[in-house]
Image (tube, helix red, strand yellow):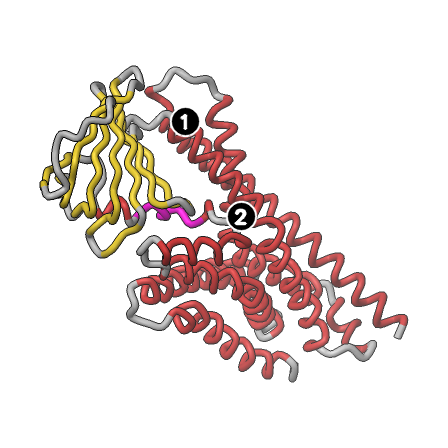
């Protein structure tokens, strides 16, 4: 029993060490690649290198979070290949520990790491991504507008050379904003007038305000509620519905709240629900990657070169990435049920891995 404990401790330590080293390599590569991208973005701005460095630092943890399943796959291949080619696998088998018992160790650690990433690291990376978008957005030439969904309604801020507008609506129904208030200010932020409307059709940039009235800064009503007027905006229905285009800014602990908020405001919460299911499935995704790595190493011939394993890892990562992304897209577009679109790729990997493990345990 003590011998088994020491072996398990040794294997756990080796696997975590490999995962840590692989993570550092991925983070370093991601940092360098993103740094070049940020430098290219800021080439027309008068900024020093500290801004691109800061932005790269802020986004790299999120990149690692998104690609961590493939870190686990490569780490698993590295781990199993090491104990196999150093004859440690044979010695462990002689001590009475089967291949399946060895595979259980990285699988268990992968689940623990997955839970840690989702519950502890994801909230931190979401804050860092928000900070990243805030800093970079301040340099965007076309970012003279802002939109947000809050518990108090839908808020839109528009800014141009002549005036600044703040728009509030209770909710979105189809292509219409409901209970709309438009507050107009001059370039010095002095209040000019307010436009109230029952609904606003936002199918295009030219909004049609129904049952609208205009109220001056002195409280005088210019138009009655029976009037329909046009309002030219920077937003249409397509832009309004893309407010959550970057779901990495949403923490795991805030997803349920955001889903409820979107539904109350008339937005589709399907993409947010996909994110929720993918977050719950993340530890199992890492588990499937560990199982797959064991199939590629323990279930193959010893004579194969290291380049063969590298080839397996690269091809598998590409196929899994695109299949997983394609399946999620089918879920977002309602071609597949949400649960099926998220869990189907993981289930297929599990089936393939278990078939391979039956063969690996016989070796």
Q: Position of residue 316 (x, y in %)?
A: 46, 64
Residue 251 is marked as none
Residue 109 is left or right of residue 211, and the answer is right
Q: Which residues are magenta?
A: 242-247
**Split into 4 quadrants, where in the image is the N terminus?**
bottom right
Q: Is residue 11 located in the magenta-colored stretch of the structure? A: no
Q: CA distance from mark 1 to mark 2?
A: 21 Å
The residue wearing badge 2 is 64
Quarter holding residue 163: top left
Question: Which residue occupies 54% across, 82% down?
Answer: 355
| Callout count | 2
Query: 31 or 119: nearer the eye?
Result: 119
Task: Note whether 5 is above or below 249 in the view shown.
Answer: below
Residue 269 visible somewhere in the drawing? yes
Q: Nearer the viewer, residue 70 or 206?
A: 206
**Image point (29%, 26%), residue name:** 141
Q: Nearer the viewer, residue 2 or 131?
A: 131
Q: In the image, residue 171 lies at what x, y percent?
A: 30, 50
Return the residue nearer the eye: 113 or 144.
144
Closer to the chain start, of discs 1 and 2, is 1
Q: Residue at x 47, y 38 (%)?
A: 130
Per the image, the residue denoted by label 1 is 39
Mark 1 lies on a secondary structure that is helix
């Amino acid at each position: 029993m003590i011998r088994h404990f020491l072996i398990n401790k040794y294997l756990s330590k080796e696997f975590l060490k490999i995962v840590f080293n692989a993570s550092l390599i991925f983070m370093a590569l991601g940092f360098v690649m993103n740094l070049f991208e940020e430098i290219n973005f800021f080439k027309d701005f008068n900024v020093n290198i500290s801004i691109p460095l800061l932005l790269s630092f802020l986004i790299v943890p999120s990149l690692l979070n998104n690609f961590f399943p493939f870190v686990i796959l490569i780490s698993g291949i590295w781990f199993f290949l090491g104990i196999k080619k150093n004859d440690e696998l044979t010695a462990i088998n002689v001590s009475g520990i089967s291949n399946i018992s060895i595979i259980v160790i990285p699988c268990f650690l992968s689940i623990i790491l997955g839970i840690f990433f989702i519950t502890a690291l994801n909230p931190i990376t979401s804050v860092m991504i928000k900070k990243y978008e805030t800093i970079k957005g301040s340099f965007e030439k076309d970012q003279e507008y802002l939109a947000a969904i809050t518990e108090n309604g839908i808020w839109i801020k528009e800014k141009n050379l002549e005036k600044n507008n703040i728009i509030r609506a209770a909710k979105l129904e189809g292509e219409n904003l409901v209970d709309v208030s438009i507050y107009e200010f001059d370039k010095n932020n002095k209040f000019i007038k307010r436009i109230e409307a029952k609904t606003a059709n936002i199918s295009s940039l030219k909004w049609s305000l129904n049952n609208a009235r205009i109220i001056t800064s002195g409280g005088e009503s210019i138009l009655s509620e029976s009037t329909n007027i046009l309002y030219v905006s920077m937003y249409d229905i397509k832009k309004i519905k893309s407010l959550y285009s970057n779901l990495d800014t949403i923490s795991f602990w805030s997803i349920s709240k955001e889903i409820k908020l979107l539904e109350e405001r008339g937005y589709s919460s399907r993409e947010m629900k996909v994110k929720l299911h993918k977050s719950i499935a993340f530890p199992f995704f890492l588990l499937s990657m560990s199982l797959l790595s064991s199939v590629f190493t323990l279930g193959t011939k010893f004579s194969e070169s290291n380049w063969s394993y590298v080839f397996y890892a690269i091809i598998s990562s590409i196929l899994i990435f695109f299949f997983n992304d394609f399946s999620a897209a089918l879920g977002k577009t309602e071609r597949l049920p949400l649960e099926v679109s998220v869990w189907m790729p993981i289930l297929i990997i599990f089936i393939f891995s278990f078939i391979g493990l039956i063969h690996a345990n016989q070796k």
